[in-house]
Image (tube, rainbow, N blue to C red):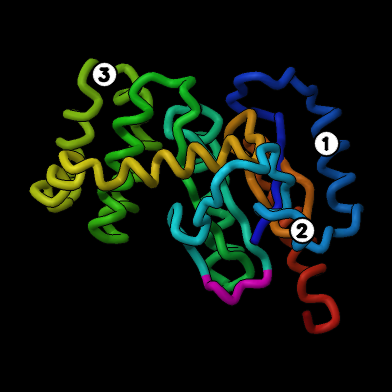
Amino acid sequence: MVVAFVVTLGSCRAEAPAVGEDDTTATTRSLLTEPPSDGVSTPILGVPNPDPNAPDIPIAELGYDRGSAEAPVKVLEMSDYGCGYCRKFHLETFPTLQDEFIETGMVEWKFAPFVTGMFGNSLPVTEAAECALEQDEEAFLALNERLWRDQAEWKGSSDAAGLVRQWAGELDVDVARFDACLAEDRRLPRVAAQSGLSRQLGVRGTPTFFVLGYPPLQGALPTEMFREILTLVHAEATRDGG
């Protein structure tokens, strides 16, 4: 399915050294001029698996998909709800990408939230988002938006699980089903699988984007740069009627 983008114009990073804006721009420009890979030679999203003994992860069953499955460009986003740069991306850039690329059938976008371990309260809110997604798409989208918008509130809360449960009720989520999902830990395997996927892919900062056939980019890309990349990738994917 995918390959990635990693931009360090803003990313929440655990291990990798900082990269300057000039270096990031050069990396992005080189990505646009390099020929795409065949996207087939490596087992997970076009990225070599650093652990050949790791179990296969059912990527198609993870995350939340937006857009047409027939879209010529596929993107996987891996973000942590606690990451400030992920919040910036979702509030400032993603709405434009959704309007111009996803809703127009150019791009299929898979959002896979995972827990990096860098941010307090990230685990309970990610579990809550997964339980909302289990309920229905509208419930998930409403809670997802609230988690990004009011990130500082739940990150600073002494009872993030209780706060997010309150929000779920305000957003017309079926709280009884929501509570049952959390109590039975039905979403924990998905959260664990998405975190495992991040390790297999070697994700070292958030947000990280994987775009089929191209090298990884990590970080909160400026909207114009992301628009340029997706436009050129789409043109390449559809060249000669492809």
Of mark 1 and mark 3, the one earlier in the sequence is 1
Q: Nearer the viewer, residue 217 or 96?
A: 217
Q: Which residues, given as a range, are shown in magenta?
A: 68-72
Callout in the foreground (3, 2): 2
Residue shown at 56% from the left, 54% from the top: 96
Say left or right for 213 vs 10: right
First in sequence, mark 1 or 2: give its number.
Answer: 1
Residue 179 sits in quarter: top left
Q: Quadrant of residue 106?
A: bottom right
The residue that mark 3 highlights is 157
| Dot 1 amino acid type | Thr
Classed neighbour count for the residue bearing mark 2: other residues with Cα under 10 Å, few (<14), some (14–19), many (≥20): many
User: Residue lying farthest left?
Assistant: 176
**Quarter of the picture holding the N terminus:** bottom right
Label 1 crowding class (10 Å Cα cut-off): few <14, some 14-19, many 20+? some
Q: Nearer the viewer, residue 120 or 199?
A: 199
Which residue is labeled 2 in the image? 213
Q: Are marks 1 and 2 in contact (CB under 8 Å)?
A: no
**Residue 108 visible, this angle:** yes
Is residue 64 shown left or right of residue 161? right
- Disc 1 designates what residue? 25
Q: Give yes or no for contact between labels 1 and 3 (Cβ–Cβ under 8 Å).
A: no
Give SS at disc 3.
Answer: loop
